[in-house]
Amino acid sequence: MLASAIAVVAAVGMCGCVSQPSPFDGKQATEDRLPDAVAQYAEGADLATSRYQGRVGAWDLYLMRGDEPYGVCIAYTDGTPEHAGSGCSGGTWVRVALSDGSEFEANLNGFLDTPRKGELQVSPWVRKVQRGEER
């Protein structure tokens, strides 16, 4: 019986199976907390899971887990309530279009391809994408 258990452990160890990193790994840092300017617009999002992803131009971007039935949410702000918002999706990715024409896409599985011309990788899970271009 012990030999069987050791064989299973050894087989799992040799397969090289490694789970993908998640934007929600680790503890939430101070910079990850959603600012009040955007928190009021993050309907459907679990604010306790917010993670800062980076800045593009004037926009600060955050990812959050969604409350049921949502799986993922992305929030954006330039620091003012007038230019803040969010979008949620029931799947593992979501896309938002902002008032200045910018579009951002989040994918909890990460992006397997390199950014296309005109796109910008913000984090392993967030990209600025071309407006209106389907993936």
Image (cartoon, rainbow, N blue to C red):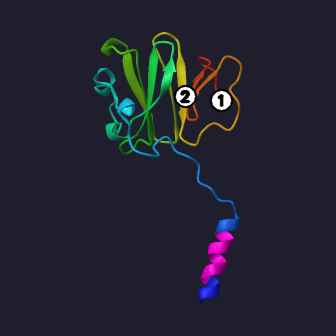
Query: In this orientation, which residue lies closer to the viewer: 85 or 26?
Result: 26
Stretch in magenta: 5-12
State whether residue 15 is above or below residue 22: below
Which secondary structure dominates the residues rendered in magenta?
A: helix
Name the residue rendered at 36%, 15% in the picture. Answer: 79
Q: Residue at x 49, y 40 (%)?
A: 23
Between residue 42 and residue 27, name the one nearer to us.
Answer: 27
From what the image shows, is residue 40 above or below residue 19?
A: above
Q: Nearer the viewer, mark 2 or mark 1?
A: 2
- Tell me which amino acid carries mark 1: Arg
Q: Where does the N terminus fall, quadrant-wise?
A: bottom right
Q: Position of residue 95 (x, y in %)?
A: 52, 28
Please report contact status of discs 2 and 1: CB closer than 8 Å, yes or no.
Answer: yes
Residue 44, image x and y in percent? 34, 36
Tell me the quarter of the image containing the C terminus: top right
Magenta stretch: includes residue 8: yes
Name the kind of residue labelled 2 in the image. Answer: Glu
Q: Mark 1 highlights which residue?
A: 135
- Element type at marker 1? loop
Q: Is residue 12 left or right of residue 64?
A: right
Mark number for residue 105?
A: 2
Give the image location of residue 133, x and y in percent. 64, 21
Q: Residue at x 33, y 13 (%)?
A: 80
Residue sitting farthest toward the bottom: 1
